[in-house]
Image: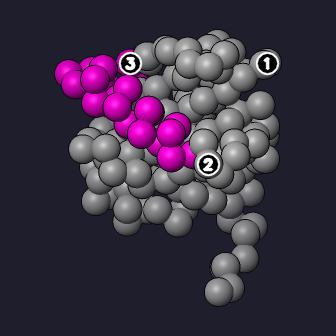
Amino acid sequence: MLLALLISNSVGNILVERYHGVPTEERLHWRSFLVKLGTDNLKGAKNEELFVASHKSVYIVYTVLGDVSVYVVGKDEYDELALAEVIFVITSTIKDVCAKPPTERLFLDKYGKICLCLDEIIWTGILENTDKDRIKRLIRLKPPAEF
């Protein structure tokens, strides 16, 4: 199961976070752990260079893309190789939506479309779609959200 997806800016502020099967009381721990992991290891990292860690019998794959950092946490069948595939789909989709590796401002400008794409990629902790053309087609079918 994919337990968490977090996207943060270069100073560690969370831009997007999605949890699946993680108790509410553990989310703060994961948030702070992942941000600290990124600040310790992602300085000077190249775009889309993958980093791997494990913590509490789960796997973590993370990378930097433009001005944002992407973290994916999984367990069981989502080992580091599967998570590398997940993070590749996420980063390539974000680059497609933003037309380049995003700055924080560009990411926030395209926030709604990025969230729709993330919903199509990961659904309730399971990798749903990996084909970029299919993801683009599916997000066009979504009606505007009503609040």
Q: Nearer the viewer, residue 34 or 52?
A: 34
Q: CA distance from mark 2 to mark 3?
A: 31 Å
Check contact, mark 2 vs mark 3: CB within 8 A.
no
Residue 59 in percent (x, y) is at 61, 19
Check disc 2: other Cα within 10 Å, few if <14, some if 14-19, many if 20+. few
| Spatial CA span between label 1 and label 2 | 24 Å
Residue range highlighted in magenta: 27-49
Q: Tell me: 103 left or right of 48.
A: left
Q: Which label is found at residue 25?
A: 2
Characterize the magenta stretch by its predominant secondary structure.
helix
Residue sitting farthest toward the front: 25
Q: Residue furthest bottom?
A: 147
Three-letter amino acid code at the position of disc 3: Glu
Residue 99, which numbered label? none
Residue type for callout 2: Glu
Residue at mark 3: 49
Badge 1 is on which residue?
A: 77
Instruction: Please provide percent x and percent y for residue 75.
Output: 72, 23
